[in-house]
Amino acid sequence: MKLLVTGGAGFIGSNFIRYWLKTHPGDEIVNLDKLTYAGNLENLKEIEKNNNYKFVLGGITNVDVVGTLVSECDLIVHFAAESHVDRSITDAGAFVKTNVTGTQILLQAAKDHDKRFHHVSTDEVFGALALDSKDKFNENSPYDPRSPYSASKAASDHLVRSYFHTHKLDITISNCSNNFGPYQFPEKLIPLAITNVMEGKKIPVYGDGLYVRDWLYVDDHCRAIDLVLEKGKIGETYCIGGMTTDINNLEVAKKILKLLDKDEDMLEHVQDRPGHDRRYAIDWSKAKKELGFQPEHNFEEYLEQTVKWYQDNQEWWQKVKSGEYKEYYQKQYGSSS
Ligand code: NAD
Ligand code: TYD
């Protein structure tokens, strides 16, 4: 089977490609990535010479490139996106272009060439839950996105479903909670906190820090997508989440400090994010029942593993934080934009 993976040079996409080539060694992967600030070919160094892997530099809004690559593959796994809420607050334009227009261009190509399309989405499309509730999001939760990022992902989900209903395109969608693990860009809470502390800097905690995320180790997300591709029903959505129970950002930051043997004076409360979603939690019982999915990596143990990964791979994140990582591919491919 030949997969077209979009956004495979980012955090989850690169973990997915490594996962897939290990678990399906006979399959081929083409990775279409524009290499925005979040794309880093060093994430894929260990497989770049694998004969079943090919990288193509290009954007998902390029109709010609997308059309050719879609025509040559068996299925599309669509990760490419602008993914950081804070950036969507300062400049939403790229979010609409990539997450909405880019997804539509991919869908049109998938329709033209009659290809299976899996869309990787987020639980943030459902909005926010109250801190004092026991509610969880599920596949029937109403859409209520509250940031330009989640609004653009919600729009992309709707477009994906519209191609199923209108054009009978073979689609599936997964709405997953916050991931963590190796190769996550150090602008997101967990890698930012770990690397800041290793640099002797404080952890910026937005507002009161009592914001709750449903953390999932990235390998569990990759396996969930594999299960959706293998067993998911066409036209269906699957909510994917972790096994943490309502752990807040302050507690996550304190755990990281403890793992790095540092005091809580390394925490710094800073101005809150506008429109900050209070709590996310996922009910993944449909994925369990229909796909046999359940998270296998517990938060405490894999937070420790993740801290260790950032300790063992200082060169990787130092190059990202200094901007030097761009030189690696600029030498091979020139500028991406
Ligand atoms: P990321 O920001 O680390 O990576 C995004 C990748 O997409 C980068 O390699 C970037 O170069 C590429 N890209 C961006 N615009 C592009 C374009 N126009 N054309 C081609 N490539 C482009 O993101 P991530 O955290 O790996 O997230 C991947 C997907 O998973 C996204 O769709 C995101 O919405 C979804 N998701 C993420 C999380 C999470 O916790 N990170 C949780 C649930 C769902
Ligand atoms: P983030 O990793 O940006 O993911 P998302 O906004 O998609 O959930 O943020 C996770 C949580 O951590 C969120 O509640 C915002 C908070 N946060 C901080 O407190 N400080 C930070 O520096 C960052 C980046 C996030």
Image (tube, grey):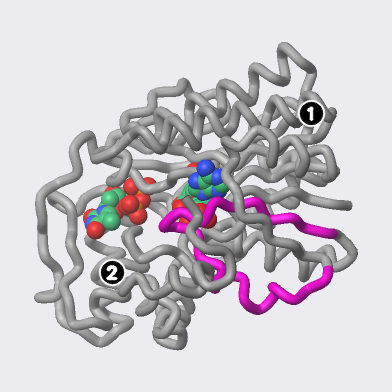
Residue holding disc 1: 170
Residue 291 in sight in this render: yes
Disc 2 Cβ-to-ligand 2 distance below 8 Å = yes
Label 2 Cα neighbours within 10 Å, binned few <14 / some 14-19 / many ≥20: many
Q: Is residue 252 left or right of residue 220?
A: left
Residue holding disc 2: 193
- Which badge, 2 or 1, is on the more N-terminal residue? 1
Q: Up-down: is 164 above or below 222?
A: above
Q: Up-down: is 160 above or below 123?
A: above
Q: Is residue 296 left or right of residue 123?
A: right
Would you identify the image quadrant in which residue 276 lies? Answer: top left
Q: Up-down: is 142 above or below 77?
A: above
**Where residue 42 sits: x, y (%)?**
54, 73
Residue 241 in sight in this render: no
- Residue closest to the eye, 157 or 223: 157
**Where residue 5 sits: x, y (%)?**
69, 50
Q: Residue visible at 88% across and 52% down?
A: 1
- The answer for how far apart the CA atoms under marks 2 and 1 are is 40 Å
Q: Residue visible at 31% across and 75% down?
A: 195
- Residue closest to the eye, 132 or 317: 317
The part of the chain drawn in magenta is 28-51
**Which secondary structure, mark 1?**
loop
**Which secondary structure, mark 2?**
helix
Which disc, if any, is residue 70? none
What's under tag 2, amino acid-wise? Answer: Ala
Q: Residue visible at 74% across and 55% down?
A: 30
Would you identify the image quadrant in which residue 109 lies? Answer: top right
**Where residue 123 sits: x, y (%)?**
47, 38
Q: Is residue 10 magenta?
A: no
